[in-house]
């Protein structure tokens, strides 16, 4: 069951991404030849109008193949590097550069929309911790600095606090040096200088936040959030999930993360399955909440990773399209095709290496 849930989550993220490409392509008058979930041999298909909807054997992604998206194999064009005008009005290559940019960007945009929907569901049902202090730990830096219950965090180290998750992020980036924390106490803005304490790899100042219930909590010890608080927190929670992915990419390229920290589809499916198996023992709703949280991180991951300016993923295609928009003419298909080919080879090698590492991790 855990494996089935994992495949379902992974498939939904891919379907949403590819549907973004599909619907924007159709709206721009581009014929979509195939909308595929999975890769490799065909196991099921359904033809509707000009589009073949298919499911393929390997659940490792998907694709939306559009008419004229790949550079046509024209001998004269390949030799001269001059793009030949195409007469097919429903061809991808025959659309304006900004129409093509919108089609390519749509995949990541739809993943970000899914992220917003998931966070709205999580916040509106589970509630959320606020920036208001509910209680303090005796002997910890916050209590020693004179912070009291009812104070609301305004900023940490000059960074505005939008949601509670901004606080541990700011403290982590600060380390153990003294830090300025600005609070709101009944309308009075007060500044405190606090030195966080390192505990179990986390930098803490020692306070528990006031928790708000979601829209369906009913009677409870905690106050109920209103719709504006729900929408505000959901928006900034989506930003938080995206920042987690961006921070991880920065750590990866800066060397703070190693190759062993990378995970491919094998690890993703394995982790989702394990989280489900553990969570379902507690309660069905716990399983749903944890799976949705992982799905939020994964859809943010998929959106941001696909926007990296690396061929042959969407970001690489966008890079060439922006170059075309600036130059007023496209890069020759021969040069672009060569770059994409090199990118495909490197991407396949990376996937193989990461998947092999994931399989070894499973056995270990």
Image (cartoon, rainbow, N blue to C red):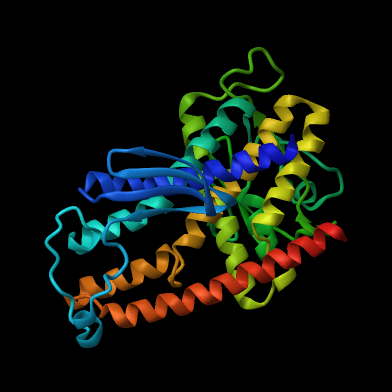
Indicate the position of residue 104 as horizontal and vertical percent values.
Answer: 34, 58
Question: 280 or 344, which is in the foreground?
Answer: 344
Q: Quadrant of residue 325?
A: bottom left
Indicate the position of residue 291 as horizontal and vertical percent values.
Answer: 66, 38
**How many callouts does the rendering have?**
0
Question: 332 or 220, which is in the foreground?
Answer: 332
Question: 53 or 167, which is in the foreground?
Answer: 53
Residue 235 visible at all? no
* Quadrant containing the N terminus in the rendered view: top right
* Quadrant containing the C terminus in the rendered view: bottom right
Indicate the position of residue 250 as horizontal and vertical percent values.
Answer: 58, 70
Q: Looking at this rendering, what residue extends furthest in the top direction? A: 219
Left or right of 86? Residue 52 is: right
Image point (20%, 78%), residue name: 327
Image point (59%, 45%), residue name: 10
Image point (87%, 48%), residue name: 139
Indicate the position of residue 111 as horizontal and vertical percent values.
Answer: 46, 47
Q: Quadrant of residue 98?
A: bottom left
Q: Is residue 78 above or below residue 316?
A: below
Q: Quadrant of residue 76?
A: bottom left
């Amino acid at each position: 069951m855990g494996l089935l849930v994992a495949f379902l989550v992974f498939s939904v993220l891919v379907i949403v991404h590819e549907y973004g490409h599909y619907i924007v392509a159709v709206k721009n008058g581009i014929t979509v030849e195939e909308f595929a979930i999975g890769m490799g041999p065909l196991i099921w298909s359904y033809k509707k109008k000009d589009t073949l909807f298919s499911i393929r054997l390997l659940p490792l992604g998907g694709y939306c193949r559009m008419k004229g998206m790949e550079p046509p194999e024209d001998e004269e064009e390949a030799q001269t590097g001059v793009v030949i005008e195409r007469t097919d009005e429903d061809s991808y290559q025959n659309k304006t550069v900004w129409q093509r940019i919108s089609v390519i960007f749509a995949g990541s945009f739809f993943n970000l929309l899914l992220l917003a929907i998931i966070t709205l569901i999580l916040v509106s049902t589970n509630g959320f911790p606020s920036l208001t202090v509910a209680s303090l730990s005796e002997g910890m830096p916050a209590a020693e600095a004179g912070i009291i219950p009812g104070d609301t965090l305004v900023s940490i180290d000059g960074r505005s606090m939008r949601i509670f998750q901004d606080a541990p992020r700011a403290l982590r980036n600060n380390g153990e040096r003294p830090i300025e924390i600005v609070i709101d106490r009944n309308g009075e803005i007060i500044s405190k200088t606090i030195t966080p304490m390192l505990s179990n790899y986390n930098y803490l100042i020692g306070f528990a936040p006031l928790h708000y219930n979601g829209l369906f909590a009913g009677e409870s010890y905690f106050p109920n959030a209103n719709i504006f608080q729900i929408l505000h927190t959901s928006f900034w929670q989506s930003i938080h999930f995206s920042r987690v992915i961006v921070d991880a990419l920065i750590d990866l390229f800066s060397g703070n993360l190693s190759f062993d920290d990378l995970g491919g589809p094998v690890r993703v499916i394995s982790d989702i399955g394990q989280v489900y198996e553990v969570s379902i023992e507690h309660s069905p709703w716990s399983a749903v909440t944890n799976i949705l949280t992982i799905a939020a991180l994964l859809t943010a991951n998929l959106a941001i990773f696909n926007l990296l300016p690396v061929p042959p993923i969407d970001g690489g295609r966008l890079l060439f399209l922006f170059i075309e928009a600036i130059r007023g003419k496209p890069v020759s298909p021969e040069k672009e095709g060569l770059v994409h080919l090199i990118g495909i080879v490197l991407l396949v090698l990376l996937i193989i290496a990461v998947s092999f590492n994931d399989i070894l991790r499973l056995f270990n």
